[in-house]
Amino acid sequence: MSLNETPMAERTHIGFFGIRNAGKSSLVNRITNQQVSLVSDVRGTTTDPVRKSMELLPLGPVVIIDTPGYDDEGMLGSLRVGRMKEVLASCDIAVFVTENDEPDPSETELLDLIKARKTVCVIARNKTDRIEGGKVQAASDMTAQGFPLIYVSAKTGDGVEELKEAIAKAASDGAKKTRLVADLIHKGDTAVLVIPIDASAPKGRLILPQQQAIRDILDAGAISVVTGVEGLCGTLSGLRKDPALVVTDSQAFSKVMKIVPDSIPLTSFSILMARYKGFLWEAVEGAKAIDGLGDHAKILIAEGCTHHRQCEDIGTVKLPAWLRGHTGKELEFTFTSGHGYPDDLSAFDLIIHCGACMLNDNEVRNRMAAAAEASIPFTNYGTAIAHMNGILERSIAPLINP
């Protein structure tokens, strides 16, 4: 990712779904005006999800994803459908592509799955160029699905602009309203960001939540002051007035709390990210389950990215050590990264997720929903760390009725 490129998690993810040979790949190529996907008359040409990051007017930065057909068959076909479902779990918008006026059984099943996921959807009735006389039905069983219906032809381009506009409207209707930090401060305020530079810090750069916090503070017309833990005392004493907010890395929270007076609001990047992703209060509730863990309790520690793990990695080294120390129990851990989140969560007693800065909101919501469905407590790194250190109440105080 270049320095000026929109992060993947902040792009609108648009997935194209349907049965084999509905024209998904052709429509993706037509909308992007590029040969993103291989196209042929052979059913099941697309065997793996194909992703393309681009600017799509009038929407802006997006990720376009072509997927295998939902009705694929055989052992490999079943695996492909599984990959398609993974894409659906992470999409902001589903474009359901069909050449039928009435959904066949596989299409009905897929539409039901989209509804169950509560994914925003637009139906693209494709291949209108094949309809005798060029006329289409004014209404069909597809309209009964409750989603916008656009008639298109990937071959001729008819209706493609209307489809883009429908996708943009759907994205606008479901647009995120939450800010990372800007709604906690006012124009002209100062926000101090405490960023430890230790062995686990990436060399020569800031991690994404830190970058996003700086940008959001600037967008609010406020002043961002960045320091390390060692320089925090001098930074605070050098300011003409108290900062409106101090944000720190979760691992340094206990040290920073001793430096920052109680009169100054204090929170962490991880807790801000949990609020931004929409699961903070579930994470606060889930952290309480740490105290009730017994011997050999099974804990899933999930990360959204696939970074190189270092000797002091927070997910695989520090968190397990802190959890064992806090509970005094012998605990069992399972670690996942990237999109490799388990389908079956029933074996776990607790799920602790990273800040999810590399996952889009829909994928995070689906992970949390899967945990809730399995009655598994769900929290994140920063909230768990704050709970174990007895500082959770102070760290969430700035976020209550901001």
Image: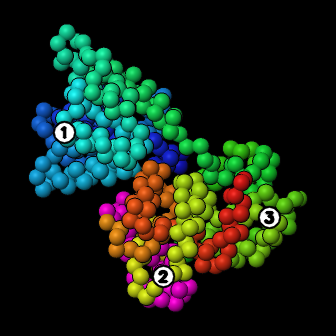
Count residues near mark 3 (Cα–Cα under 10 Å), then give few for <14, some for 14-19, many for 20+: few
* Label 2 Cα neighbours within 10 Å, binned few <14 / some 14-19 / many ≥20: many
**Real-space Cα distance between discs 1 and 3?**
59 Å
Residues 59 and 197: in front is 59
Q: CA distance from mark 3 to mark 2?
A: 34 Å
Colouring convention used in this rendered image of the protein = rainbow
Whether residue 17 is visible here, answered yes or no, is yes
Q: Quadrant of residue 99?
A: top left
Left or right of residue 362: residue 239:
right
Q: Amino acid at mark 3?
A: Ile
Residue linked to disc 2: 293
The disc at residue 264 is 3
Return the x and y of residue 244 as percentages of the image width and height: 79, 57
| Count of number-bearing discs | 3
Q: Which residue is mark 1?
A: 105
Q: Which residues are magenta?
A: 314-343
Question: Disc 3 on helix, strand or loop?
Answer: loop
The mark that comes first in sequence, 1 or 3, is: 1
Secondary element at tag 2: loop
- Crowd tier of the residue under label 1, counting other residues whose Cα lies within 10 Å: few below 14, some 14–19, many 20 or above: few
Tell me where residue 399 appears, x and y as whole percent. 68, 58
Q: Is residue 278 or residue 101 the one in the foreground?
A: 101
**Pointers 2 and 1 in contact (C-beta within 8 Å):** no
